[in-house]
Every structure is written in structure tokens, then in C-alpha cells.
Image: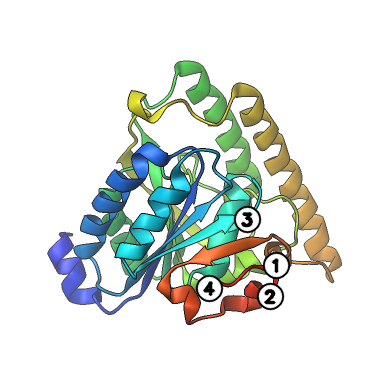
Amino acid sequence: MTGGIVKHRWQQITLSVVIPVYRNAVTLEPLYARLCRAIASLTECYDIIFVNDACPEGSSEILKRIALQDDKVSVIHLAYNVGQHQAIVVGLAYAVGDIVAVMDADLQDPPEALPSLVAALLTAHDVGVVFAGRRGRYESGVRLATSFAFKTLLRWFGKVPRDAGSFCVMRRQIVERILALPSVPPYLLTLLSLCDTRMMSLPVIRQARPIWAGTSAYSEWKRLRVALQALWGLIQMRVMRRQGHYPTQLDRVKVIPFRCLGSRFTQLSVNSALASGEAP
């Protein structure tokens, strides 16, 4: 399905794009430019939410410049580093679109794939989430093998597509289900696995991390720790859901101090989470 047909049929949908940012200063401006071009073929009703996860380099200044020149862009600056997946949940708490997309800021996932993901979601009425299925030699053989083993476990426990990553689109009700899940350290794929929805993936070639973009923030040890936390978190959430009466992911967001930049945040107070942050 071409971008023109998508825009003709669904130009009135609202789309929010959530992007966690950590050590991505050199990719932010090209990412923003490519993302805007991709969304233009899809809808005019959108917003982009960057979540600055206490990035130690110059991301804040770049994000501020982008937000000041585009009123469709908002930026959440976290007071301390909470990790990629908690930053995603913070962004989801402020997303207001009928469709919500999540993607990384390092340009390994092509923004140009977004219209195809949205089209697949809107044509498959029984599907709640569509992933960009990872294809290509975007990592070393060792990393690809360990990632495959981890995703296989998630497939067994949570019915998540084996080629799933962080780049995905989901319906509004899935976002609400995520925010209502028990408050344990989050991992996006485990959260989605508990949302009682059908998931699918479309193959998308993932690029190797550009040399000029620096090295990944995920060391081998950090990857192992995140994987173990994700599996343990899945078990915890399943137990807590059976017991009931638990603090939610949204409750967890409310205690994270942050400040917001962008015209939308001067007008809206989403999910009352501003009570714990600093208004712009």
C-alpha cells in the first residue's frame, strides 16, 4: 500500500511518536527530518515526544531547538537516568494519539517504515501491536545469537514475535493497558506480552549503528542484566495481576521528577502526572 493511499484513507487519525533519547545527539536532527517526511505521507494530525533520559552530552540543546521550531514536538527531560524502557513508559503516559509509535533515536530503525507499520495495524482489526521485524546484519554474530535466544524465551512466555524490537506501533487501548500494569522495572516487550492482544511483525531491514553515531550504551553485561530483569519482571507482573491491588506503571511515572518543553505541555495535563514534575 502506498503512502498516498494511506494518507487519503486515514489522514484524520492522530499519531503520537515516542522516542527515548540517551547518547544520541548526532542522530537527533537527521532522525527528526526523516521522521517528519515519513509521517507527512500518513497524516497531518501527529505529535512527536522525545524523552531525554538524563543524557550526559548535548542532546538537551538540540531537542530544545527542535521543539522551539516545531509545535508538534514536545520534550520531556528526566532529572536522572531511568533506562530506555522506563523512559518509553514516561513517553507513553503523555502520548495522546489514536495510534502510538515507539522507536529508538539511533537511526538503526528506518523512520521510513512507519507508514507501512501503521497501515498494517489499521487494516488488521484484531491486531493491537505491529512490530518492525528485525532483519539484516545490524550487530555482531554473538549479539544476534544471544538476542535470538532471549527473544525465543519471550516468545514462549509472552507470545511476542521472535523478531520484535522496540520499534512498533500500537492502538490507544494498548497504551492504557500498559499504564495500568503492575509497577515493576519495565521492559517494553514484557509489558506488551501482558496486554492480552494479538501481535504481528513486518520485516524491516535494520541498519548497523553508524560509526559517526558512537557506540551503543548497552554493554554485554548491561544486555544480560536487562534480559534477566525483563524475564523476572514478567513473572512478577503475572503474580501481582493475580493478587490485584498493586501500584501501576502510571503510578511509577508520577514519582519521576522531570520538566517538559513544548507547546502541547503548556495546554494539557495528561493523566495528572504533571503533579510530580515541573511545569514548563
Q: Which badge, 3 or 1, comes first in the chain's sequence?
A: 3
Q: Which residue is mark 2?
A: 275
Quarter of the image where the N terminus is located: bottom left
Task: Check contact, mark 2 vs mark 1: CB within 8 A.
Answer: yes
The amino acid type, in three-letter code, at marker 2 is Ala
Name the residue at 65% across, 68% down: 277
Q: Nearer the viewer, mark 1 or mark 4?
A: 1
Q: Which residue is mark 4?
A: 173
The amino acid type, in three-letter code, at marker 4 is Gln
Q: Nearer the viewer, residue 80 or 40?
A: 80
Q: Residues within 10 Å of mark 2 (few under 14, many from 20)?
A: few
Compute the Cα span from label 1 to label 4. Answer: 20 Å
Report helix, strand or loop for mark 3.
Answer: helix
Report helix, strand or loop for mark 1.
Answer: helix
The amino acid type, in three-letter code, at marker 3 is Leu
Q: Which residue is mark 3?
A: 191
* Residue 272 in sight in this render: yes
Label count reads 4
Compute the Cα span from label 3 to label 2. Answer: 25 Å
Q: Residues within 10 Å of mark 1 (few under 14, many from 20)?
A: some
Q: Nearer the viewer, residue 196 or 166?
A: 166
The amino acid type, in three-letter code, at marker 1 is Lys
Name the residue at 84% across, 71% down: 245
Q: Nearer the viewer, mark 3 or mark 1?
A: 1
Name the residue at 57% across, 48% down: 53
| 217 to the left or right of 226 | left
Q: Which badge, 2 or 1, comes first in the chain's sequence?
A: 1
Name the residue at 62% across, 44% down: 83
